[in-house]
Amino acid sequence: MSEASHVEWSRNMFHVLAIGGVWGVPRSGLIFTRTGEDTLTLTGVMPHEEGMPITCGELFAQQAADIEQITKYMEMAGITVIVPE
């Protein structure tokens, strides 16, 4: 998928959400909420649980990589992504 395709997909995903709408990323257990006209906020992060097929470190790395990519493409689409500390 090209970078332009990722940006367009991100823009479309965001605009499907109403303000207050929630988007979950099953692969990494991230939850984002549309919090404004052009704002998406990370509002939940799935913790690692015993029995998961990946280690805690692998899950953390996957979540960090997904946050980085989502932020990159959303911001290229004109959407501010807020990731609380």
Image (cartoon, grey):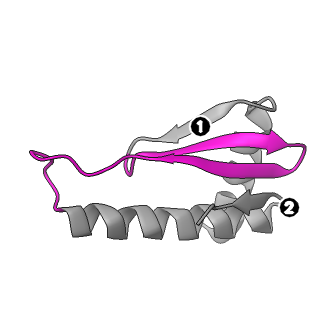
Q: Is residue 21 above or below residue 2?
A: above
- State left or right for residue 44 relative to residue 38: left
State if disc 2 and disc 1 touch (CB < 8 Å).
Answer: no
Camera-side residue of 34 and 17 = 34
In the rendered image, the residue lying farthest to the left is 51
Q: Amino acid at mark 1?
A: Trp
Q: Is residue 51 above or below residue 74?
A: above
User: Which residue shows up at 17% across the image and 57% down it?
Assistant: 54
Q: Position of residue 15 (x, y in %)?
A: 80, 38
The residue that mark 1 highlights is 23
User: Which residue shows up at 51% across the image and 38% down it?
Assistant: 24
Camera-side residue of 45 and 70 = 45
Q: Amino acid at mark 2?
A: Gly
Label 1: how many residues lie within 10 Å, few (<14), some (14-19) or many (20+)? Answer: some
**Label 1: which secondary element:** strand
Q: Position of residue 71 (x, y in %)?
A: 65, 65
**Circle number at residue 78:** 2
Q: How many marks?
A: 2
**Label 2: which secondary element:** loop
User: Which residue shows up at 16% across the image and 62% down it?
Assistant: 55
Q: CA distance from mark 1 to mark 2?
A: 18 Å
Label 2: how many residues lie within 10 Å, few (<14), some (14-19) or many (20+)? Answer: few
**Circle number at residue 5:** none
Range shown magenta: 27-55
Residue 34 position by quadrant: top right
Q: Is residue 44 above or below residue 56?
A: above
Q: Quadrant of the N terminus?
A: bottom right
Q: Position of residue 14 (x, y in %)?
A: 74, 43
Q: Quadrant of the C terminus?
A: bottom right
Q: Position of residue 37 (x, y in %)?
A: 90, 43
